[in-house]
Amino acid sequence: MAKEKKLVEAITSMEEDFAQWYTDVVKKAELVEYSSIRGCMIIRPNGYAIWENIQKELDRRFKETGVENVYMPMFIPESLLQKEKDHVEGFAPEVAWVTHGGLEPLQERLCVRPTSETLFCDFYSNIVQSYRDLPKLYNQWCSVVRWEKTTRPFLRSMEFLWQEGHTAHATAEEAEDRTIQMLNVYADFCEQVLAIPMIKGKKTDKEKFAGAHSTYTIEALMHDGKALQSGTSHNFGDGFAHAFDIQYTDKENKLQYVHQTSWGMSTRIIGAVIMVHGDDSGLVLPPRIAPTQVMIIPIAQHKEGVLEKAAELKEKLGNFRVKVDDTDKSPGWKFSEQEIRGIPLRIEIGPKDIEANQAVIVRRDTREKIIASLDTIEVTVGEVLETMQKEMLERARAHRDAHTSSAADYEEFKSSIENKPGFVKAMWCGDRTCEDKIKEETGATSRCIPFEQEEVADTCVCCGKKAKSMVYWGKAY
Amino acid sequence: MAKEKKLVEAITSMEEDFAQWYTDVVKKAELVEYSSIRGCMIIRPNGYAIWENIQKELDRRFKETGVENVYMPMFIPESLLQKEKDHVEGFAPEVAWVTHGGLEPLQERLCVRPTSETLFCDFYSNIVQSYRDLPKLYNQWCSVVRWEKTTRPFLRSMEFLWQEGHTAHATAEEAEDRTIQMLNVYADFCEQVLAIPMIKGKKTDKEKFAGAHSTYTIEALMHDGKALQSGTSHNFGDGFAHAFDIQYTDKENKLQYVHQTSWGMSTRIIGAVIMVHGDDSGLVLPPRIAPTQVMIIPIAQHKEGVLEKAAELKEKLGNFRVKVDDTDKSPGWKFSEQEIRGIPLRIEIGPKDIEANQAVIVRRDTREKIIASLDTIEVTVGEVLETMQKEMLERARAHRDAHTSSAADYEEFKSSIENKPGFVKAMWCGDRTCEDKIKEETGATSRCIPFEQEEVADTCVCCGKKAKSMVYWGKAY
């Protein structure tokens, strides 16, 4: 009992200290271990299995839109990184530099890729000649490095895993369509699989990607009311094409520059899953992404027939990702572990249950207990998992809506940011000056100009001039 | 026609210049493109799709043996790399060093991982406490960097993709069992999926991995008679455990050192697939690993009903990986492309075939043509693919056996190495001196001490002293 207590007590309450709660959960659920390298994390099996499921789901969705996977070198020569002015300014201050190979100094420094636009551009300039070569719809799964000062597991680390799609198109319109298409792929994936509702919109010029014409984003709201940018999709127009000389011959035999996009989602999204769905007992994983969906925990497993019945039950639930915890720990300890790790359902089965031809299903999110007949338990489990998935999304959406307010003037805006953690919808004149002022005075940043616009007021919440658009504001990770 | 001719002529004949043939194939089959970074390759969609299939097959086999995936940092601090003496001596001369992060010099240099033993050891020393924590059976899929002087696509590049498994066990016996188990997983995979027969054996001390007690290997023979080390599995004993202080409390509450293994297979194996099965028309992919197994090529596709029938046929073959080439290229051009890319089967279907309710299946390896009724073509395709897979393995085995000889004395040995490219089986006394001498005088290295021993003679082929074991020798990639 002492040990069990220790396991649960190890997690700080969310209300007490959300940041500490987060750190406790990633550590106690064994998602991550700190490494000897400052700011680099070790992703443990419980964490990596979530990423594998994310990869599988996203990769399938990408391929359905015609995307093919490739692998580019992890190094970028300094001269290549410098070819696009805005891009190098954005990334050069935060890259890791390789200066020696073996025992020799290098003639030219190489940076470890912080992102691979420059490599893809160099590649495209070699392989794109004719309109027949377009579009190029390439993606890679890899790790990238950004030399961050302060880091947190999943949310911000020096090295992280991601996918980066890079496409080249014949026309500006095609590129814009692809940019939006991939943003929708991300948003649909997050809602349907991760049960996280997203605000889709455009970044302001201040917040857009280094070198992009426009950046689109999906923004989620965490349990503590802070926003998390969860995926981005960039339209580069023909800017990189000019810098890297990527031209093709069109049907009229005229040389044209290509139009490009890039889009990425990273292990950061695991941070969103933790902070949207978790509770004081630990992680809560949406069934569709959970590496283990059901943990069968035998009660009084030393008694005759119990372990056999548990194994039989696992067999019967073969359509789901199921495990039996038949270790020599106590059932209470096993419950705590299953809860900390966020496994969606546990099934308790002991001698009395077996006698009654039943088992007890317990939902991780609501703790609801469902007595299920062993004859049809595979149907019940399927239904409960579906319901749980649906309700997790509904709860996340309700939480977000309850933490989204509108502000017509600056006083209201400041009060909302200060007192009601969450999104604030407010009008904006479009000037960088107001954006900077708001950030400086309130700590809130523009999250996005949402596709779904509302007229919260006529004038900019900051300067009072005529408003151009409604913006979601918030403090962010 | 001129264009078609160009496509085929682009590949140098194997007999004329095998190295150039190889380069032509990887380039013309669009497996790889050279990058701006010396020695680093871009893996293009045709190449990466092969790697994805290899990953899927291997990963499933690993997981069936209880292995879990993790992700470790790509950087290793210099002090960590230096903890195991033999290991650092083996790898330090060929690593890339990161000396600056952002605008600041680092206090300690970091190397880009050439392999991750040191990181896993550091990790295990933190998470292994009790016998209950063992075994740890972890694997990661990642890229590694080795600063090679001369490079060739897939075979030897500065950066390459691989998996590296790292396990920790309570006993020496368990570690040895796991080392052999994983070697068998590799060998079975290569034979069953890649249709490449392997010699399984142990490396000599000279050829073993830096820091290992023993290294096991699978060795394949390429078309040109050179050997290719295709996968290795290392038993570290408790050497790293001592260097990194990885101890656990056993059931008697006594502190014990763990015993460790590591094992890896890389994109190098794609080079083996090319060099074992390819021919003068390009790549030949075994059906089980081919990203596209069947290419349907419509004949006279402008004629009414042809493209519709081709699409219908694709539908009917839904259990296979099938594509229709409905581009506006000529059929001859499409045939050449399908052949260069090594797609196992093409199906030609034109107006006359449709009238006769049939299609023509052409095997990539033998060029055999099979007329198949459209009513049962899905059965025929399945059978032909199975036969092709089986016969490719048989042919590869026959080629290897025809290029394997035995040598009882040194004259015979030297003559074999010089005149009959392939493996030479010969006895060895066990002395490094003889191994060095053979390498210096003939260019052949010991490939392995095979598990299946034969008594080719009584005495060492080099020094004439009493022989300890039979060794496979050969020139190698």
Image (tube, coloured by chain):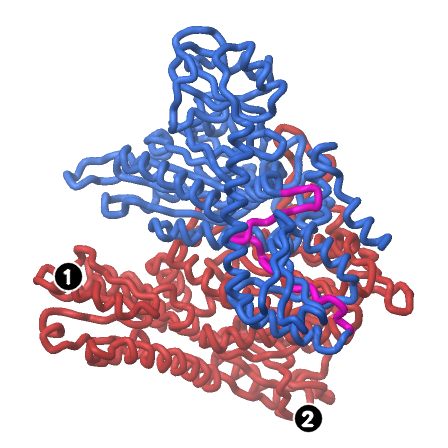
Chain colours: A blue, B red
Using the rendered view, name the quadrant where residue B374 is placed.
bottom left
Whether the magenta-drawn stretch holds residue A299 is answered as yes
Q: Residues within 10 Å of mark 1 (few under 14, many from 20)?
A: few
The image quadrant where one finds the N terminus of chain B is bottom left
Magenta stretch secondary structure, dominant: loop
Classify 10 Å Cα crowding around label 2: few (below 14), some (14-19), many (20 and above): some
Where residue B80 sits in the image (x, y, percent)? 75, 49
Marks 1 and 2, Cα distance to the nearest angstrom? 62 Å
The residue type indicated by label 2 comes to Asp
Q: Is residue B48 left or right of residue B84?
A: left
Are the residues flagged by discs 1 and 2 from a single subunit?
A: yes
In terms of image quadrants, where is residue B177? bottom right
Mark 1 or 2: in front is 1
**Circle 1 — which element?**
loop
User: Which residue: 11% across, 78% down?
Assistant: B356
Residue drawn at 42 percent across, 47 percent down: A139
**Image mark 2: chain:** B
* Residue at image coords 73%, 53%: A336
Which residue in the protein does label 2 denote? B458
Q: Judge whether A420 appears above or below A140 on screen.
A: above
Residue B28 is a magenta residue: no
User: Which residue is at the front of the view, B10 or B116?
Assistant: B116
Image location of residue A46, percent across then percent down: 64, 54
Determine which residue is flagged by label 1: B1
Q: Quadrant of residue B414?
A: bottom right
Task: Name the subunit of mark 1.
Answer: B
Mark sitting earlier along the chain (1/2): 1
Q: Nearer the viewer, residue A77 or B62?
A: B62
Secondary structure of the residue carrying tag 2 is: loop
A247 with respect to B259 (left or right): left
The magenta segment is: A278-302
| Rendered view: B475 above or below A449 | below
